Amino acid sequence: MDYISKQETDTLAEEKKSPSTKFDQLSLNDLSNPPTDEELRRYKDLPSSLLPPIHKREMLKRIYVNRDLKLDRIEFFGFDMDYTIAVYNSPDFEELAYDMVIDRLIALGYPKSIKKLKYDPSFPIRGLFLDKELGNLLKIDSFGNIILCVHGRRTLSSKESTDMYPSMRVPSDDIGKRFYLLNTLFTLPEACLYSDLVEHLEKESNLKLTEEVADEQQQQNSPPLTSLHQNTEGNMAIEGDVSYTNLFQDVREAMDLVHNDGSLKTKVLDDMPRYIKKTNPSVLFDRMRQNGNKVFLLTNSEYYYTNNVMSYLLNDANPNYKSWRDYFGADKPRFFSEGTTIREVDISTGNLMITKVKDRFEQGKVYHGGSLSLVQKLIGAKGSRVLYTGDHIFADIIKSKKTHGWRNLLVVPELQHELQVIVSF
């Protein structure tokens, strides 16, 4: 019979109390390759209590996929600018657009009482349908079933909704005709303003909103607000009945005016710290270029606006890049489909040059127009080798995916609130 000393007994007891002792005596690096049976008997992993905490990326900072993507197969990274690289401060930007459209409507004859209306950031969301005939905002599910109906700011009861929509569905044939889809972040102030106008005009104005609408041909032939404004020099006054459809057309055209005439962009450029978040995308772009990838910017904003915004975000961010253009090696909907004539932009004047674009794009230069097919040819890209990031599921994602097989990353800022709700449970 073997006997052990008291010191040996104390040592064994201490080893049982401290599992890390055995691990220290025979670590993973001490094992043979392959390890012997004796080594395996003596070896023990560190207990989980002694391991460092597992790092998990916060839910709000994760990327979610519905299909596997191997980034080592991506050669070209493309980005939209608005709401992707340039993130607008909310609700400041929406409030600006909302107020400017109200001013435009007042100039076109709407009652001055609408000036008191204010943008409510808690009200509109993307993905709503606007019923131009009945003046309602509709929330539907993925099968086209109506799950919520709002008139003005009032949520309609189930009975009221059923009376208006017996099938409680939005017919796919009427999408784009009777039902207008509010599918971009730029439409948030538009959705809020339309509902506010319905609420205000029905309750506080002498105007009467009706469901009577002209037939489709009459609506197409109706004069735009711009020509009406020019003909009357701002003295036109709206009287009598206004249909929900006409109200929609007026709001839609006024919104287009403040975007297309440059007045909204001018306000943004005059105070960019207020309206654009000062992010630092230079780190990401530099990492992509260091990895040998080509990076391109594809936006439907004019050059003067793009140049100012991108300079604000990227110039002086990295001493290795003199200009934002050095990071990068288009009316987007047309670009993704039929395309337009491609021209180089004179960066000193912003004008289009008449010289022919060569057989490839040149580093640091800016181009206007073209089509996706032509760009793929000029940069030598294949569809599956391109990853394009944008915020517009139709103009940015679906067309580039279906037409040319680009891989896509969709920016959905609304998920932040949804994830915060999940985390809170």
Image: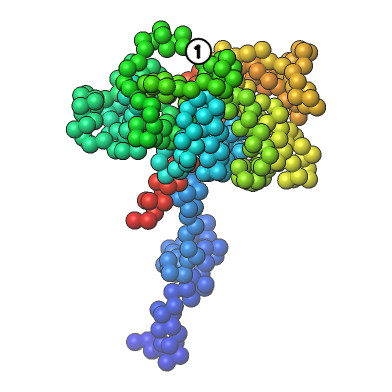
Q: How many marks?
A: 1
Residue 409 at what x, y percent from top left? Answer: 51, 34
Relative vertical location of residue 409 with respect to residue 169 in this rendering, above or below: below
Relative vertical location of residue 424 with respect to residue 199 in this rendering, above or below: below
Please name the colour scheme applied to the rendered image.
Answer: rainbow
Residue at the spot x=75%, y=24% of the render?
Answer: 350
Relative vertical location of residue 243 with respect to residue 119 in this rendering, above or below: above
Among the 4 quarters of the image, the one containing residue 376: top right
Compared across the picture, whether 25 is left or right of 163 comes to right
For label 1, the residue is 223
Residue 368 at what x, y percent from top left? Answer: 68, 20
Please say whether residue 125 is visible from this viewpoint: no
Please say whether residue 87 is visible from this viewpoint: yes
Q: Which quarter of the image is occupied by the N terminus?
A: bottom left
Compared across the picture, whether 273 is left or right of 159 comes to right
Of residues 76 and 19, the one drawn nearer to the viewer in this rendering: 76
Residue at the spot x=50%, y=12% of the render?
Answer: 223
Residue at the spot x=48%, y=63% of the render?
Answer: 53
Neighbour class for label 1 at 10 Å: few (<14), some, many (≥20)? few
Residue at the spot x=34%, y=56% of the render?
Answer: 425
Of residues 408 and 33, the one drawn nearer to the viewer in this rendering: 408
Of residues 265 and 301, the one drawn nearer to the viewer in this rendering: 265
Residue 217 at what x, y percent from top left? Answer: 41, 7
Among the 4 quarters of the image, the one containing residue 181: top left
* Label 1 secondary element: loop
Name the amino acid type tagged 1: Pro
Compared across the picture, whether 396 is left or right of 285 comes to left
Residue 194 at what x, y percent from top left? Answer: 42, 31
Among the 4 quarters of the image, the one containing residue 314: top right
